[in-house]
Amino acid sequence: MEASDQQLTALLDDLEQVLTLPEAAQLRSIQGLWLDYRRRHCQWQANFFAGGSIQPMVYASCADDLTWERIAALKFNLCEGQGMTGACEASRRYDRPMGQP
């Protein structure tokens, strides 16, 4: 989860450079809501294993998966036309590394 969080932070920093000030402010607000959603959703998933030794792993796996999904959703905003023409070099830096689920 640490690697995906670092990637997301780097992506958000890069996005700040290409968005207008109002767009960046809106993204920061939305990102706060998304982080709350991730925490709550993954806690809900992990609660199915309450008291079990696997509970922390379920939470971490959930958070990692959601973070990579978030990266995939945001990375095209680095591209011309917000990704309408597909991936670009800037967005490819945020592709999920091979071998990761």
Image: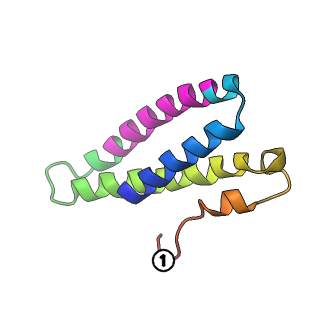
Residue 33 in view = yes
What's the magenta bit mostly, secondary-structure-wise? helix
Q: Residue, x 46% and y 56% (percent of image)? A: 65
- The answer to whether residue 24 is above or below residue 12 is above
Tell me where the magenta segment starts and ends, as one range. Answer: 25-43
- Locate residue 5, reporting x and y percent: 42, 50
Q: Which residue is mark 1?
A: 99
Q: Residue, x 44% and y 56% (percent of image)? A: 4
Q: Is residue 63 left or right of residue 18?
A: left
Q: Residue, x 75% and y 60% (percent of image)? A: 87
Label count reads 1
- Locate residue 79, reporting x and y percent: 76, 51
Q: Quadrant of the N terminus?
A: bottom left
Task: Specify whether residue 27 is painted magenta.
Answer: yes
Quarter residue 81 falls in:
top right
Q: Is residue 17 left or right of residue 82?
A: left
- Locate residue 7, reporting x and y percent: 49, 54
